[in-house]
Image (spheres, rainbow, N blue to C red):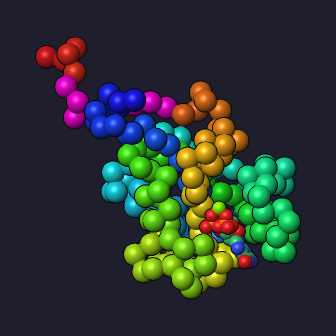
Amino acid sequence: HRSKSTGLPGAKERTLVAVKPDGVQRRLVGQVIQRFEQRGFKLVGLKMLQVSEDLLSEHYCQLRQKPFYPNLVHYMTSGPVVVMVWEGHNVVQTSRTMVGHTNPTEAQAGTIRGDFSVHVSRNVVHASDSLEGAQREIQLWFQAKDLLDWDCCDQASTSEV
Ligand code: GDP
Ligand code: MG
């Protein structure tokens, strides 16, 4: 379908991005948001919360059997996270490129992980890895009423003189 604001096909695609506890503690929230804004994506949902183990085990349900899972739970529940929904053309794939490789050692400079992190267990951000994953995660973290549809102020308004 078509977005009213841009008219480009696929412009309504959405993904979930989170600044993890280390990113919040290192005051990186603003820089993460800035990168998504300047790339051209639209922020449609945002909140800060301390994650429960229940929510986290749903979020990372595919990783429960991994040897690092207990450490991942400890890391992700160690402080507040800032979780966001970003919207725009190919936002799922482009977000993954912007975030960079899971292991910061492999992450290219210019990516968020490549610029701000050194260890896989403190890699600053999360981004959904597929369209299906994004839909699942957005529903898990947000209520539909807390995702907002809005148009840009540079759109012509018929009600203004
Ligand atoms: P992502 O989608 O790039 O975040 O990577 P995954 O979905 O595979 O893993 C989720 C998160 O678990 C990663 O972002 C890391 O924080 C953590 N993680 C993944 N692999 C490892 C690992 O081998 N060791 C540790 N300690 N943490 C890991
Ligand atoms: Mg993942």
Q: Is residue 108 visible?
A: yes
In the rendered image, the residue lying farthest to the left is 161
Measured as percent of width and height from the top left, residue 75 is found at: 75, 69
Majority SS type along the magenta span: loop
Q: Is residue 74 visible?
A: no
Q: Is residue 62 left or right of residue 138?
A: right
Seen at 20% across and 16% down, the residue is 158
Seen at 53% across and 41% down, the residue is 45
Measured as percent of width and height from the top left, residue 50 is found at: 74, 53
Measured as percent of width and height from the top left, residue 28 is found at: 52, 67
Identify which residue, 41 or 94, lies in the foreground.
94
What range is drawn magenta here? Answer: 148-156
Measured as percent of width and height from the top left, residue 1 is found at: 39, 29
Identify which residue, 140 or 129, lies in the foreground.
129
Quadrant of the image where one finds ligand 1: bottom right
Seen at 69% across and 50% down, the residue is 49
Within the magenta stretch, is there residue 143? no
Q: Is residue 153 left or right of residue 142?
A: left
Q: Is residue 40 left or right of residue 66?
A: left
Image quadrant in which the C terminus is located: top left
Identify which residue, 145 or 109, lies in the foreground.
109
* The quadrant where residue 149 appears: top left
* The quadrant where residue 123 appears: bottom right
122 up-or-down from 137: above or below: below
* The quadrant where residue 31 appears: bottom left
Seen at 61% across and 41% down, the residue is 135
1 up-or-down from 67: above or below: above
Within the magenta stretch, is there residue 151? yes
